[in-house]
Every structure is written in C-alpha cells, then in structure tokens.
Image (spheres, rainbow, N blue to C red):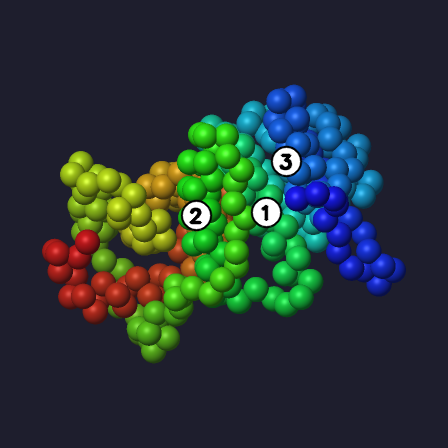
Amino acid sequence: MGGELIYQTHDGQASVGCSIFADRADIRHQLQEDCDSAGLSVSHSGPLSSLREMLGARLGEIIFIDCPEIDAMRLASLAEMDMYAQRSGARLLISTSLAALNDVFACVDQSDPQMLVEAGRAERIVAMGQALADWRMSGVREWSEHDRMTLLRLSEEVTGLAQRLDQFGLPAPQADHTNSAFSFGEAEAGKKAGRAQRPALPDARLVRQIIQQRQARARFFDAGLFADPAWDMLLDLTAARVEHQRVSVTSLCIAADVPPTTALRWISQMTESGWLQRVADDQDKRRAFIDLSDKAADAMACYFADQQIGGSLI
C-alpha cells in the first residue's frame, strides 16, 4: 500500500487527510503508522487538549478521537467536534471505554460518528477502512438500507478476522463491499396495520422470559453461534417500553450480547433505518436514551400478536 491515497476534485487530485486526537502516546503512534500504511495524509496528531484549537483548521476527511476518560473539557470538545464533522462531512471515529460510553454518546448527536469501545488495533484499522469507504461512497450516491446492512454484516466478519490475525501480528484484511442476501426490511404486518389498529405490546414478563431463554443457551453452546444483536435489542426495548423504563446505550449494548463496538454499529444502523430512536433526557441534556421507533413498536406488537404470544417464542 505505497503512496498516498488520492481522490479527484474539481481542481485535480488531493490526498485523503485525517487527524488524530489522543492523549495516549502509544495510540497516537499506532494510528499514525496505520494511516501512513493506508496512504492517508495525517494533517494533525496531538493530545485531546489540542482539539478545540484545531477546529478552524482543515482536519481532513477522517477524524479519530481516543477518549477513554471524560471530564467537562473533553465532553465540550467532543460536542464541538461532532458539530464540525456534521458541517464539514468528515467521518468521525471515537474510541472510548464502557464506563464513559453513556456520556460520550449523549454529547455526539449530530454527525452519527462511528464509536468503538475498548478497541484493539485491528478493530481501529477496520473502523478507519469502513469510514473511508463510507466517505468515498457518500460522494457517489446515497447508501440504501440494504447497502448499510450489508456493510455492517461484512464489517463484523472482517473485524473478527482482523482480531484473530492481530494475535499473530498479521495485517488486517480490507473489506470488500459485495452484495448480500441479508435485508432488514419492513415487517409485512407493520406495513398493513396503521398505528391506531395495532395490537398492544406483549406482557413484559413474557418478553423477559424469552430473553432469559435466549441467554440460557450460552450455558450449553458457544454464544457466537446464536448472535442476533438486532433481535436481542428489540426484545429488550420492547420490555422496557411496556415497563415504562428508559434504556441507556450502555445497557442496550449489554442486552445485545455482543462486543460493545459491534452493538454500537447495530444501534447506529438501526437508528438510521428508522427502527430505533435517540431520546434526549428532558431533565439532563447531558444524557440520552435509546427507544423503539413507532415503526418498530408497531412491528413488534404485530409480530407477537401473529405468534399468538406462545410460550415457545424464543
């Protein structure tokens, strides 16, 4: 992968640029090496304290922020960078910790950043590749729902492979955006039934029982054999809605029963596809929750009604 990666502009060609903000020197060094290997032009690399003063500069098409710990200054900087990315069209990648996830998630609601939780080097490489692919494709056409879900499935496979290769010091593979049979389409019942006619959501106790049955399988089988984060999150949010409980992004990641970064990818794509929605806390603007959209609530209600709410629903 020699040389700089370039793209065509109306004035000719320009290198694809990126910026790195990380307090941990080893992370900055790794990211610098990985960007150089990928042919990206690093326009800035420095600690988080330099983030706000750089907002007026050209930061490039990909901006990586490593923020495992938060305070008022870091949260304010993230919020400003989120708005900058939304205005400029840059792809924002944020690496954080599970402990800081709720606070970080709440303050970045403009640019739909790609978020990583306690990510290793291989996962960061894959995330940069996905951000670059997303940025390049955005200049050509809008992503369809099928495209987004195909990329999500493919990213999961590539991330898992990259993590295994990373253990042996081998280079991570590049994602190939191919077609997939996977489709996260509208539920037929949800199409036919208007919200006023939809059945009631099921008893939360039944949904919690289904969740427990699904989790019990991990005692006897490899948990990855049954990984289905979208359905696990929909079940958890359905029960929470009936119970009038709010669900934080950290809680939903746990409910998904997959690594937090994978869960965040699903949350982002399901939100963009209209199945989930981000809900701000009226009492505390620094907090945000995840809820079913009306479309998803309709579909879940119709699904359970169609299944006669049987005890074998797992």
Q: Is residue 111 above or below residue 44?
A: below
Q: Position of residue 208 (x, y in %)?
A: 22, 46
The residue sitting at 31% across, 73% down in the picture is 189
Q: Quadrant of the N terminus?
A: top right
Separation of marks 3 and 2 at Cα, in angstroms: 20 Å
Sequence-wise, the earlier of marks 2 and 1 is 1
Q: Position of residue 113 (x, y in %)?
A: 59, 46
Q: Report which quarter residue 184 is drawn in.
A: bottom left
The residue sitting at 63% across, 61% down in the picture is 137
Judge depth for marks 3 and 2 and give the one in front. Answer: 3
The residue sitting at 21% across, 69% down in the picture is 306
Q: Is residue 28 above or below residue 62?
A: above
Sequence-wise, the earlier of marks 1 and 3 is 3
Q: Mark yes or no: residue 136 visible.
A: yes
For residue 34, the mark is 3
Q: Secondary structure at mark 1?
A: helix
Q: Report whether 194 appears left or right of 210.
A: right
Q: Position of residue 301 (x, y in %)?
A: 28, 64
For residue 156, the mark is 2
Do labels 2 and 1 touch, CB within 8 Å?
Answer: no
Separation of marks 2 and 1 at Cα, in angstroms: 13 Å
For disc 1, the marked residue is 129
For badge 2, the amino acid type reads Glu
For label 1, count other residues whose C-alpha is less than 10 Å away and answer few (under 14), some (14-19) or many (20+): some
Q: Quadrant of the C terminus?
A: bottom left
Q: Position of residue 249 (x, y in %)?
A: 44, 41
Sequence-wise, the earlier of marks 3 and 2 is 3
Q: Secondary structure at mark 2?
A: helix
